[in-house]
Amino acid sequence: MKKKAFVALIASGALMMSLAACSAGGDTGAGESGASNVGGGKLVGVAMPTQSSERWIADGKNVKDQLEAEGFQVDLQYAEDDIPKQISQIENMITKGAVALVVAAKDASAMTTVLEEAKSQDIAIIAYDRLLTGTDAVDYYATFDNFLVGQQQAYTLLNGLGLTDLDGKATSGAPAGPFNIELFAGSPDDNNATFFFNGAMSVLQPYIDKGVLKVKSGQTDFTVVATQDWKLENAQARMEDLLTANYSDGSKVNAVLSPYDGLSRGIISALTDAGYQVGQGWPIISGQDAELDSVKAINAGEQYGTIFKDTRDLAAEAVKMTVAVLNGEEPEVNNTTDYNNGKKVVPSYLLSPVIVTKDNITKALVDSGYYTQSEIG
Ligand code: BGC
């Protein structure tokens, strides 16, 4: 359906709701389930990258539930990190008559043709968590402050090494080092990966320049430290190589910058296989997403911290944006400068990420209802 017709439909729905609200004790305008009927049963396509990581399963569920609560029908698809599969899933959503697409791309720049097809049919397009690049078809972007995520990953490491607090403020009497550090970045086809890495390096580079941190392998270039497809196995294999090539002389790696919990788990396996033991010179390791296994690893002292990004809040933001665009309104944004996708600066709403270490697991993850205490163990 074209946007204009949809606006009319929403307007008539709103009118019905306000009329209903006037009728004493009557229908509230809610659907049978008590949900709002803003969506009027229209279809929204939700394209997620993979089910191989918990966070995207939570994202998909949260976006679907929240759209359904607004009265939309939802076609939720996972591409399992397969680019042609994600393109054909989106093509299918267009064919089925979706009025909006919420897309977390496997590959930021590979969706241009299908998105332009959607745009030509007046379908609203929201980039979800990951920017869609190389096209002006994308309307808005809902995400977290990705540069800050990277900075927070670096603060996590510095804090674990006793150099700063979790805001990056230098600790008095901090050790002089040098500490050996190795660096990992995310998948090069994900626009977030460079934001995370640049954010982290903006904090770490001065410490490297001062000689407090030493990248023993010398590998500091994004292209060299990137992890294709965000795959655990790729990070594990690279960590094994780094240990063999640079730490066979009895020296130890003291910190590892990891941009995602799944990679941290691969890095932990490589360290364990190489004979490292928790409590005996075990390195400080960062992460992202607060995945359940990694929260357990933080409790066990294997991982020092993670970055928690509440997928319920991100879903709510994306749903708000979708409804606003379909209503012909401008959604609230808080960043109109940082996310240039090569064709336009995409108006964005950035949510705030939270550092989680052993000290605030309960406060951040249990009190907020993200996990139950028994899940964490
Ligand atoms: C997300 C991260 C996630 C990574 C791997 C990124 O685009 O922002 O939260 O860890 O993808 O799935």
Image: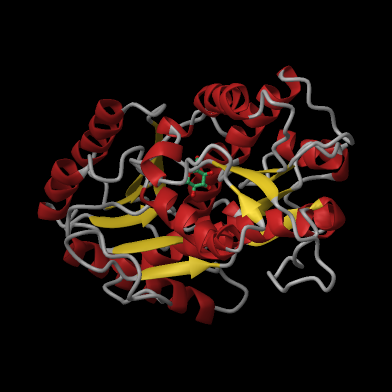
**Residue 357 showing in the rendered view:** yes
> Outermost residue toward the bottom?
22
**Which image quarter holds the C terminus?**
top right
**Relative to residue 189, is residue 234 drawn left or right?**
right
The residue at the point 60 percent across, 34 percent down is 262
Q: Residue 280 sits in which quadrant?
A: top right
**Relative to residue 94, is residue 262 drawn left or right?**
right
State the scheme by which the image is colored.
secondary structure
| Residue 85 x/y as whole percent | 29, 26
Give whichever of 24, 123 is nearer the camera: 123
In the image, is residue 335 above or below residue 180? below
| Residue 76 x/y as whole percent | 41, 37
Q: How many marks?
A: 0
In the image, is residue 105 above or below residue 176? above
Give whichever of 156, 134 is nearer the camera: 156
In the image, is residue 87 above or below residue 363? above
**Relative to residue 241, is residue 7 drawn left or right?**
left
**Relative to residue 99, is residue 146 drawn left or right?**
right
Give whichever of 1, 50 is nearer the camera: 50
The residue at the point 80 percent across, 36 percent down is 282
| Residue 177 x/y as whole percent | 74, 55
> Outermost residue toward the front?
249
**Residue 286 showing in the rendered view:** no
Q: Residue 58 sits in which quadrant?
A: top right
| Residue 102 x/y as whole percent | 36, 50
